[in-house]
Amino acid sequence: MIDDVLAAIDHLSGRVTASAMTGMGCGAAYATFKGFPIFKTSMSTAVSFALVSTACFGMERVANVILRQSSMLIDGKSIASNPDDDNGDDSSIIQPTTNSRLYYGSHALGGFFGGGVVGFLFKGNPMAGAFLLTPIMLGIGKIEVSLDEYRNERLQQLIKDIDQESDQEQNSTWNVPQYTKTDPTK
């Protein structure tokens, strides 16, 4: 239980940090273009990006947990299982950790509800924030699906390479020359 909470906090903090750094760069570029003080503008933009990403990714994590639990109640199995995996290998390293429907669903809900919170706080109009941030969160979900697929393919390739190397070592014979004693007087 506590490991799941720590994993969710780690997931959230990584994305918020990346968003804040993006905001800092965007703020510096905007300040340079408009002639505003660079430090003040970039810090203000970084904090705004961090607040928006905290709302969206926090709601995304909540939606992720709700979607996982509801799928287990409805289907009787976890949405994270991969029904297309027919290779017979039950290794959790090889199987994808989540399904793309879970990524897209949780990111869409996170963008909608987190965008609603942000829209209400900044503009007083929750739907404006929801309509703005839902497509952005879906784009981030697409990036995460692509990265997860790449990671799984790379892990499968590395495991295949390690298995091939171990098979070659087992099949190779050591050709050690046999030395015999010879009589130097002959």
Image (cartoon, grey):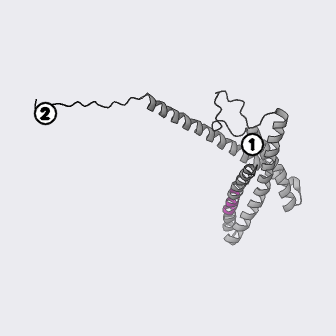
Inspect the image, locate mark 1, and give the three-letter code of the amino acid beneath it.
Answer: Tyr
Provide residue 142's location: percent of width, then percent of height: 71, 43
Neighbour tally class for label 2: few under 14, some 14-19, many 20 plus, Cα within 10 Å: few
Which residue is labeled 2 in the image? 184
The rendered magenta stretch, by its main secondary structure, is classed as helix
Q: Nearer the viewer, mark 1 or mark 2?
A: 2
Mark 2 element type: loop
Place residue 118 in its image quadrant. Answer: bottom right
Q: Is residue 104 above or below residue 88?
A: below
- The Cα–Cα distance between marks 1 and 2, rounded to whole angstroms, is 78 Å
Q: Are marks 1 and 2 in contact (CB under 8 Å)?
A: no
Q: Residue at x 76, y 52 (%)?
A: 57
Asked which quadrant contains residue 184, the reply is top left
Question: Does label 1 or label 2 sit earlier along the sequence?
Answer: 1
Left or right placement of residue 87 versus residue 185 in this view: right
Relative to 34, residue 69 above or below: above
Residue depicted at x 78% and y 45%: 64
Judging depth in this view, the residue of 153 and 31 nearest the camera is: 153
Q: How would you rate the neighbour count of disc 1 (Cα within 10 Å): few for under 14, some for 14-19, many for 20 or more? A: many
> Percent x, y for residue 165?
48, 34
Q: Mark 2 belongs to which amino acid?
A: Pro
x%, y% of residue 53? 76, 56
- Badge 1 is on which residue? 103
Near-viewer residue (182 or 77): 182
Q: Range of the magenta residues?
A: 18-26
Horizontal and vertical percent for residue 85? 67, 30
**Residue 17 shows which numbered tag?**
none
Element class at badge 1:
helix
Give the residue furthest to the left: 185
